């Protein structure tokens, strides 16, 4: 027999013969609990495998039919490729038949069969009535093209035809496409003597092999795969679409439960905010309102959540999404969970517990929408993603959701293996215009067009404000502009150097302008012109005169204030203007060192015979160590002198 990654699930009303049918075709009893055998109903998920005549082995998931166990049914149906909708010919369509079919539609199941059971307990006319009722039920649903097959699990009548249709179903159903890192929603946890902790589930995506390191999410407990089984047989690896039992080391049974996920190490991040596309059932009794409390079923998770509508009705938030409609939403859970991109979900009213809708998780780790403009932008982005969901568009959507993100952060949110991520990203970077984002910086930073526009707008406002306050200055240096942006929380994880590259892009687009002064790039508004009044010009001349008069006994800003009788603010502005023109520098201890005094000091050093030390220079220029040491250290920093031990020499090229 050949293992085939294909899961067939049962669905249907309680006591319509789901478990009996599975036993009839596989020989396996899916009711394993004593309570199930005693009460004669399925309570928990059951599992079996079936060897088809073609030699292919497929998995079967048997789900409970009672309305109280919809949680288990949704968990079981979340990982199936096709379904056998079971309807007892003796009773016809019942309430849970309809709800199960609704859930199958919401979970994106696209193929299956309708099986009319208990044929041996009724007459042909009743069977035909049940067939007609079933045909009417499935019209316009995921099973609209499904074969309807009457069978008897007792006599075996119709089972051969059913098995043949199952073979045909496998041939018609496309194989799963999976580029994501390994994840398996846990539906059962137990321990076995001599083995330790074991979990079971259906592999949602990726592959896993013996010895691999995994994490149990959302808690993040680390574990290693000791061994694997599929259909009770030891296996070296398991893949998307297979049922698997995973024997784990380094983690206890108490650390895991249904709803947790076994994930490739480091590939998934727990979340309590997901962006999704939701569809309301036409049969829902009422619509979905903004911030409504619901029960969310995704994978094997069952958790309470709030639904935030991103596209609000013109009539107001309270109108929401009516039955039969849908749209972009954010799902905010009351506890952290782990989900995969593209995973299907079901929502039910919190009270009473009835299914009202479902959809697809588009961004598992989304940023919550904060305002109307933000909601509108996210709604538009999700509309695009819902209509064109594939790995490249998913990465682009993460960039738009975050606004600014580096390559490392994008990989952490990608849920992809590194090799796959690199290939997908390489392709995405060929379509930056289509997906409306830019790449820049040594750290490979990505910024959406919308975020770039916002950063550019904020940059322009900071520069405008600076020009209004300091019209005498040419503009702002990159470091100071970065600090102003960073304090406003507009740089994300972008480094100062990478931000300068972003400023260069803005300049290239003529959003801002640049000017080079003293070999430094200064940024300013495109239409800015420097302006100096007579009073300010006179003050700068007085500053230069006082600094020159002090000679090598360097002054500080407070000393200048006292000598000139000017305010601290005016003196600082004058010093900043002179610094920009390279006429004055502030060195260690706040000492003001003019270009004139620097040139005079270099002449002195060039004329000195023998070794240059702090002491020898002090004696030559006649000032204390308080001034000579800071001046020499400044010359060192400029590359004009070189320190060798306690001595200094003039750098090559400095005039003698």
Image (spheres, helix red, strand yellow):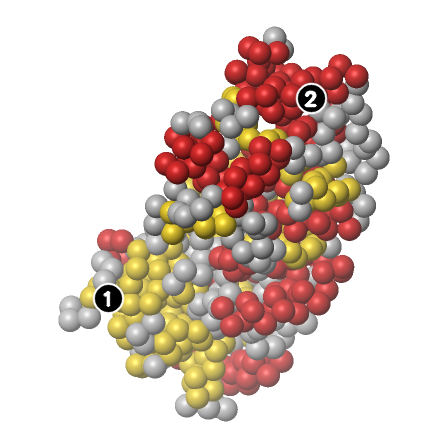
Of 640 and 308, the residue lying toward us: 640
485 vs 394: above or below: above
The image quadrant of residue 170 is bottom right
- Residue at the extreme top of the image, as rendered: 565
Quarter where residue 2 is shown: bottom left
Between 146 and 548, the one nearer to me in the picture: 548
- Residue 467 visible (yes or no): yes
Q: Residue visible at 57% across and 11% down?
A: 563
- Which of the numbered marks, if any, corresponds to residue 540? 2
- Near mark 1 (Cα within 10 A), the count class, few <14, some 14-19 or many ≥20, is some
Asked if residue 318 can be seen in this view, the reply is no
Q: Secondary structure at mark 2?
A: helix
Q: Secondary structure under badge 1?
A: strand
Which of these two is toward me, 479 or 519? 519
Q: In the shown orientation, is residue 315 left or right of residue 489?
A: right
Measure how far apart labels 1 and 2 are at the Cα level: 75 Å
Residue 147 location, x and y as percent?
63, 75
**What residue appears at the point 75 percent right and 42 percent down from the top-left corner?**
515
Q: Nearer the viewer, residue 6 or 337?
A: 337
Query: Which quadrant of the view contains residue 15?
Result: bottom left
Please tell me which residue is depicted at 65% across the width and 51% down the height of the picture: 501
Work out which quarter of the rendered image holds the N terminus and state it.
bottom left
Specify which label sits upstream in the sequence, 1 or 2.
1
Mark 1, residue position: 249
Q: Position of residue 484 (x, y in %)?
A: 60, 33
Res. 93 mark = none
Residues packed near mark 2 inside 10 Å, few (<14), some (14 to 19) or many (20 plus): some
Task: Single out the mark in the foreground, 1 or 2.
Answer: 2
């Amino acid at each position: 027999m050949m293992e085939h990654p294909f899961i067939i699930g049962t669905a249907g009303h309680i006591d319509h013969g789901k478990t009996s049918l599975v036993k009839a075709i596989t020989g396996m009893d899916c009711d394993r609990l004593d309570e199930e055998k005693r009460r004669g109903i399925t309570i928990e998920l059951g599992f079996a495998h079936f060897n088809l005549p073609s030699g292919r082995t497929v998995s079967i998931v048997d789900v409970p039919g009672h309305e109280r166990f919809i949680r288990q049914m949704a968990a079981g149906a979340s990982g199936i490729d096709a379904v056998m909708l079971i309807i007892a010919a003796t009773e016809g369509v019942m309430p849970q038949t309809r709800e199960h079919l609704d859930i199958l539609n919401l979970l994106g199941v696209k193929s299956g069969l309708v099986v009319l059971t208990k044929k041996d307990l009724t007459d042909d006319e009743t069977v035909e009535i049940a067939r007609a009722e079933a045909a009417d039920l499935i019209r316009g649903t995921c099973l609209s093209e499904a074969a309807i097959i009457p069978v008897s699990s007792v006599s075996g009548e119709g089972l051969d035809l059913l098995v043949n249709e199952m073979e045909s179903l496998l041939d018609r159903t496309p194989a799963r496409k999976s580029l994501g890192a390994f994840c398996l929603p846990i539906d059962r946890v137990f321990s076995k003597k001599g083995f330790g902790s074991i979990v079971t589930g259906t592999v949602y995506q990726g592959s896993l092999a013996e010895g691999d390191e995994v994490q149990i999410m959302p808690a993040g407990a680390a574990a290693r795969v000791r061994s694997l089984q599929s259909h009770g047989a030891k296996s070296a690896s398991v893949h998307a679409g297979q049922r698997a039992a995973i024997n784990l080391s380094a983690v206890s049974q108490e650390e895991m439960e249904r709803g947790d996920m076994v994930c490739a190490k480091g590939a998934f991040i727990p979340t309590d905010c997901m962006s999704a596309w939701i569809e309301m059932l036409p049969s829902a009794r009422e619509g979905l309102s903004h911030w409504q409390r619901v029960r969310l079923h995704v994978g094997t998770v069952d958790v309470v959540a709030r639904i935030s509508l991103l596209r609000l009705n013109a009539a107001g938030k309270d109108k929401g999404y009516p039955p039969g409609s849908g749209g972009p939403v954010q799902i905010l859970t009351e506890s952290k969970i782990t989900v995969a991109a593209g995973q299907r979900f079901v929502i039910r009213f919190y009270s009473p517990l009835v299914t009202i809708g479902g959809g697809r998780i588009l961004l598992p780790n989304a940023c919550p929408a904060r305002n109307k403009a933000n909601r509108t932008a996210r709604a538009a982005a999700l509309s695009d993603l819902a209509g064109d969901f594939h790995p490249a568009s998913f990465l682009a959507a993460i960039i738009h959701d975050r606004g600014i993100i580096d390559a490392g952060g994008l990989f952490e949110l990608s849920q992809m293996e590194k090799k796959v991520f690199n290939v997908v990203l390489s392709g995405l970077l060929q379509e930056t215009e289509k997906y409306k984002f830019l790449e820049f910086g040594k750290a490979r930073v990505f910024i959406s067009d919308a975020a770039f526009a916002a950063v550019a707008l904020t940059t322009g406002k900071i520069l405008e404000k600076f020009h209004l306050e300091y019209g005498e200055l040419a503009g702002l240096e990159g470091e100071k502009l970065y600090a102003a942006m960073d304090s406003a929380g507009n740089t994300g994880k972008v480094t100062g150097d990478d931000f300068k590259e972003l400023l260069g892009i803005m300049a290239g687009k003529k959003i801002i302008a640049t000017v080079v002064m003293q070999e430094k790039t200064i940024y300013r508004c495109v239409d800015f012109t420097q302006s100096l009044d007579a009073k300010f010009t006179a003050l700068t001349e007085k500053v230069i005169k006082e600094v020159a008069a002090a000679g090598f006994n360097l002054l500080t800003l407070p000393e200048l204030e006292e000598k000139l009788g000017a305010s601290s603010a005016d003196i600082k502005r004058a010093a900043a203007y002179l610094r920009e023109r390279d006429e004055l520098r502030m060195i260690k201890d706040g000492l003001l060192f003019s270009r004139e005094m620097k040139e005079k000091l270099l002449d002195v050093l060039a004329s000195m015979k023998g070794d240059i030390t702090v002491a020898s220079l002090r004696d030559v220029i006649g000032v204390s160590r308080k001034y000579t040491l800071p001046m020499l250290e400044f010359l060192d920093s400029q590359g004009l002198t070189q320190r060798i031990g306690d001595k200094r020499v003039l750098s090559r090229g400095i005039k003698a």
